[in-house]
Amino acid sequence: QKEVEQNSGPLSVPEGAIASLNCTYSDRGSQSFFWYRQYSGKSPELIMSIYSNGDKEDGRFTAQLNKASQYVSLLIRDSQPSDSATYLCAVNSFKAAGNKLTFGGGTRVLVKP
Amino acid sequence: DGGITQSPKYLFRKEGQNVTLSCEQNLNHDAMYWYRQDPGQGLRLIYYSQIVNDFQKGDIAEGYSVSREKKESFPLTVTSAQKNPTAFYLCASGHRGSYEQYFGPGTRLTVT
């Protein structure tokens, strides 16, 4: 089992719809969870961080965390063509020393006008 | 302007040559990281450093070396021992004690 798993996609959503991305993780001790957006050919950009169970909203983005079920999700409301990118889920490695993150393989999102 | 810079953006080398990738940050971050990304894949950790003059191997350190002589700089050398060096190399930094990491623009290395 991979430490951090994401559906590779592509997740195709019409413009204006909600894109829902999921991420599961295996390390039950993980405490810090991040979503990065990566445009094709570019480096990842941190867009959301979440540390407590529940929802965290920032603009059109909402991160949801459920530690009991070991999943974290990202909702993108009113999806725009500019949201077309790969979204990487990252989770801290509680078992390892140092401030290490483990990344999922990413979900490619395509927003169609 | 605060940020993380990586140079060069594109790098081409012949097989058997060592090559050094530059990473500099002026964010006053203690921790710095090197990742490798292959097409369609996530990020894999090569090396990381939490303080000057100290660094640890990540998940795929074989064939790579690093140094951390200054807080601002964390260069990565891809040696001839690295069997598949062609990849997108990403440097990141963050505050010690925080898991948030911020990435530089990356260096795309092609070895033929």
Image (tube, coloured by chain):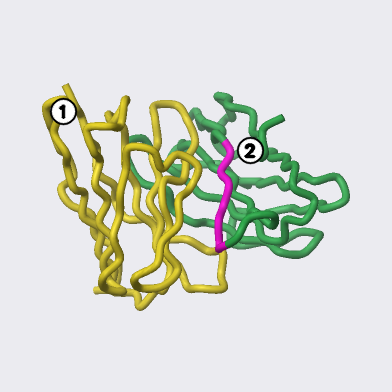
Q: Which stretch is magenta?
A: A98-104
Q: Is residue A21 visible?
A: no
Give the residue drawn at x 67%, y 60%.
A32
Q: Do circles 2 and 1 both sit on a common chain?
A: no
Please identify the quarter of the rendering in which residue B74 is found.
Answer: bottom left
| Residue type of the residue flagged with mark 1 | Gly
Residue occupied by mark 2: A19
Say few, some or many: other residues with alpha carbon within 10 Å of mark 2 (under 14 / 14 to 19 / 20 or more). Answer: many
Residue A77 drawn in magenta? no
User: Whole-percent x and y of residue B38?
Assistant: 39, 30
| Residue type of the residue flagged with mark 2 | Ala
Q: Is residue A95 above or below residue B10?
A: below
Chain designation of label 1: B
Q: Are marks 2 and 1 in contact (CB under 8 Å)?
A: no
Give the residue drawn at x 12%, y 31%.
B13
Please identify the quarter of the rendering in which residue B33 is found.
Answer: bottom left
**Chain identifier matching the yellow colour in the rendered picture:** B
